[in-house]
Amino acid sequence: MLLAFGVQLALAVPLGILDVLCERVLHRPSPELERQPLIIGCINLVAIGVPIALGLHLNRLSFRRAFPFGRVTVRQVVGVALMVLGASILLSEVDNVFRALLPPPQWLLKVFKELFFAQDKLLSRILLLVIIAPVTEELLFRGIILRGLLSRHRPALALVLTALLFGLLHANPWQFLSAFALGIVFGWFYLRAGSVGLCILAHAIANGLSMVATFVPWNIPGMTGTPDATVVEFQPWWLDLPGLGVLLAGVWVFCLATPPEQEALPPPIPPVIKDYP
């Protein structure tokens, strides 16, 4: 985690300095390089790719052995889609409550608006949020961290610790709760099905739903609403209640579609601390 943060800072800080130089020294509009989706995607690839490569090296694992994709069935995909949809609806309401209690700063609102509500750069935002982020983050958290923790701790503890780190990666309290909850869901998918590919799919669906909500042509209070996130609205009951029902239906379908956890888990990564005193 520290390595990922360090690489992100090392790559993002020079871009921020260039933005300031353009605005203050050259007296030109700031290009906001550190907020361009494609640039963020490249930084993400490097910053998370380095810890993944280090994890593979320390554990002496090949990519294929470290990241089991396994066989994914249609029923599993349906269960995943339903669970992520229901969880996204409920977590949207959780975010509304949290923002009402603790309003986010303006700079963070600007970042969210540019990533999710901007009408331009749609393809680059899809590439970042639906492809790059799910692949890199799931390979690191479910493929390296969770699987490594499973060799040292009970599955429940390993799942919670991984989700906690996943929430901390987002580096702000306004995303922590949702990221932590989704980290629990993604980790449970891994424990049940033993497939990193299924976790990547779930992550992509979750991020894709966040983008789709910004393009819905009608206003759903608290869900689509206005890009001005300073205005806090709560979702109607007719949205939250079906969201809970969809979530529970997804749990039921996914349980039917997956074997018991003990049979689905991939072989844990053996501890390597003794080899690296």
Image (tube, helix red, strand yellow):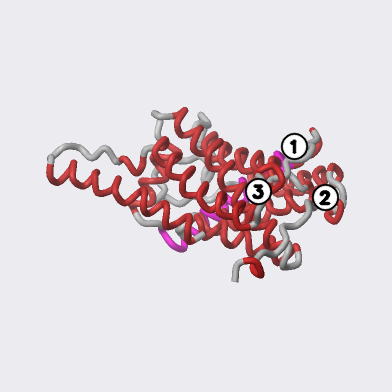
Of marks 1 and 2, the one in the foreground: 2
Task: Tell me if 93 is positioned left or right of 146 in this view.
Answer: left
Amino acid type at image mark 1: Val
Q: Locate residue 188, reporting x and y percent.
A: 73, 53
Other-residue count near label 1 (Cα within 10 Å), few / some / many at <14 / 14–19 / ≥20? some
In the image shown, does 218 or 44 lie closer to the viewer?
Answer: 44
Task: Return the residue at label 1.
Answer: 77
Q: Earlier in the sequence, mark 1 or mark 3?
A: 1
- How far is mark 1 from mark 2, CA to CA? 16 Å
Whether residue 225 is visible, yes or no, is yes
Q: In this picture, is 226 found above or below 191?
A: above
- How far is mark 2 from mark 3, CA to CA? 23 Å
- How far is mark 1 from mark 3, CA to CA? 15 Å
SS of the residue at dot 2?
Answer: helix
Task: Tell me if 161 is positioned left or right of 231 in this view.
Answer: right
Q: Is residue 96 magenta?
A: yes
Task: Return the residue at label 2.
Answer: 264
Task: Return the residue at label 3.
Answer: 87
Amino acid type at image mark 3: Ala
Other-residue count near label 3 (Cα within 10 Å), few / some / many at <14 / 14–19 / ≥20? many
In the image shown, does 110 or 276 lie closer to the viewer?
Answer: 276
Residue at (69% x, 64% y) in the render: 271
Q: Is residue 30 magenta?
A: no
In the image shown, does 244 or 262 lie closer to the viewer?
Answer: 262
Q: Earlier in the sequence, mark 1 or mark 2?
A: 1
Magenta residues, start to end: 80-103
